Image (spheres, helix red, strand yellow):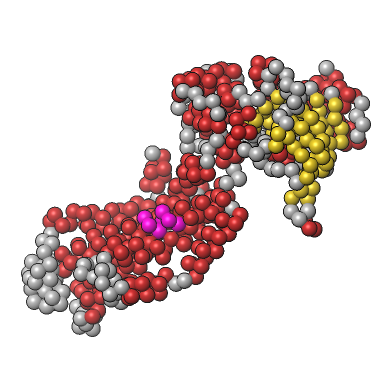
Amino acid sequence: MPNETPIFSAKNVVRTFGSGKKLVTAVDDVSFDIADGEIVSIVGGSGCGKSVLAKIMLGLYEPSKGSFQYEGHKITNQKDHWDEVQFIFQDPFSCFNQFFTIRSQLEAAFKIKKEKLTPQQISDRVDAGLMAVNVAPKDIEGKYPFELSGGQMQRMLLARIFALRPKVLIADEPTSMVDACVRANILDYLMKLKEELQMTIIFVTHDIGLAYYVSDRLFIMHEGKIVDQGKPDDVILKPTSPVTVQLLEDIPEIHKEWIKR
Amino acid sequence: MKLLRNLLKSPMFVIGAGLFFGTLLLALVGPLFADMSLDRVAESYAPPGDGLLLGADNLGRNYVALLLHGLRNSLYVGFLAGIVATTFGTLVGIYGGFKGGLIDDLLSVTTNLFIVIPQLILLILISASMQEGRSLTLIALIIGATGWTWSARAVRAQSSALKSRDHIALARINGDGTFAILLKHILPYLASYVFMVFIIQVASGILSEAAISMIGIGPLDTQSLGIILNDAKANGALGDGIWWGIFPATILITTIAFSLYLINTSMEGVFNPRLRRE
């Protein structure tokens, strides 16, 4: 059920690093609300502060100024927060420990859940997660991370989310390291997560085309500020900021058809 | 085991491991065949021959038995010192490198403080101040406690490089605590490295024991390769041309240390792909 309290609520959030002359402002006076069940994309070029914003949402950084709330309260306990808010990494190759089987690492993820499940239940949930990304559980039985391809690994990360069923998913460029075919698959799985599990998804990307394809709302970031936001059609068709125009011009031709759809 | 096959392809490793296991075998199996009694069996510095393979020392004791006792004790001291130095150094290094910040700074400063204190001088001071009860175990512990710094330094750098990897972040959001992360997600990546450090620590443990025994402040009431050399030196074996008092012990010490260094160097070539020759 959609909740009245926004999932994330940021008011004048500023995050700086360093001090004095070396002061760098990564996120500069950002305010927004993200409602339950939305897919929101944060789009921007390198160094625009989108990853820092994602880390604030994940509770890894605290804002230097302003207030950032999750479901109406400050993020105080990281483990409690990660029970409900999970993350997908950019580089699928480096995020599994090569000394343990994939399966044992998927099952290890259940340590973060407050709800304690029996080993059998955990095993069933992992199977279900694997099925959701079209991998037969026996295909990865006894396999180690280095035995899988990049696309498969990225699917393992998604299977982890399907198995854990968090309330909120933050995906930091989940498609940047895989080829175009796998990319389309991953986007479909993200849609499926939203439809089947009513998950709120924050999709962090530099690719405005992909963002347009999946999102309910777009935030365009530049130099730490949100320069443009709104429904994808409004942002794309009536950009109010020169940054958005620039991002649109930089879309490779092959993605243009998604926009014109 | 692909790793073992790769290691066996390296002649350096085969020679090193062969020499080392040879001495190990000598220490373990030797006592079954040789007469291990340390009673007076011949006159002072009886030359080799006459049933005494390596002659006798100044007290008329069989040198073969002395050397076997000494070899076993030297290996014991080396391994114990190596285990202590590697375990402690690895713990300090892995924790400091992973934690970073103030804790890392404090641990690094402590490590560096210990590094600048010359190990041999510290060993001499501690050993010399203890007139009684200098057992093999105690000497091994002292060597381990003064030698951990290099392990800590080596491991800290590796641990610090690993901590920003994604799989550590994934373990975090999986709910693993710091200790579980160190044990499951950092230590396995460093295992080959820690093992190499351990080998060097064993070698330097054996050499350190020999060095302090040689100057007469090693373990008391027991035998070790260093003590044999000290006895020979104190009783003028060198000046009188009693080669069987000096050479066998020296050759044993050199062989063990040399074989361990060979193993270490050859492993570096296998574990580091950039040094691997196809």
Vertical side of A84 occupied by A52: above or below: below
Query: Where does residue B277 sit, x and y in percent of width and height?
Result: 48, 49
**On the picture, is A248 further left or further right than B210?**
right
Number of numbered discs present? 0
Look at 65% across and 25% down and name the residue there.
A167
Q: Quadrant of residue B87?
A: bottom left
Q: Main secondary structure of the magenta part?
A: helix
Question: Quick one: quadrant of the N terminus of chain A?
Answer: top right
Vertical side of A5 occupied by B161: above or below: below
**On the picture, is B163 further left or further right than B278?**
right
Look at 63% across and 28% down and name the residue there.
A84
Q: Quick check: is B265 in the magenta stretch?
A: no
Q: Residue furthest front?
A: A73
Q: Along the line of sight, which residue is nearer the eye, A43 or A195? A: A195
**On the picture, is B148 further left or further right than B165?**
left
Look at 49% across and 20% down and name the residue there.
A121
Query: Where does residue A193 sit, x and y in percent of width and height?
Result: 66, 20
Q: Along the line of sight, which residue is nearer the eye, B155 or B269? A: B155
Question: Quick one: quadrant of the C terminus of chain A?
Answer: top right
**On the picture, is B259 further left or further right than A138?**
left
Q: Quadrant of residue B165?
A: top right
Q: Is residue B261 visible?
A: no
Looking at the rendering, the stretch of residues picked out in magenta corresponds to: B83-89
Q: Along the line of sight, which residue is nearer the eye, A216 or A67? A: A67
Q: Is residue A21 visible?
A: yes
Query: Where does residue B79 sit, x and y in percent of width and height?
Result: 32, 57
Query: Where does residue A66 sit, x and y in percent of width and height?
Result: 79, 42
Look at 12% across and 56% down and name the residue there.
B33
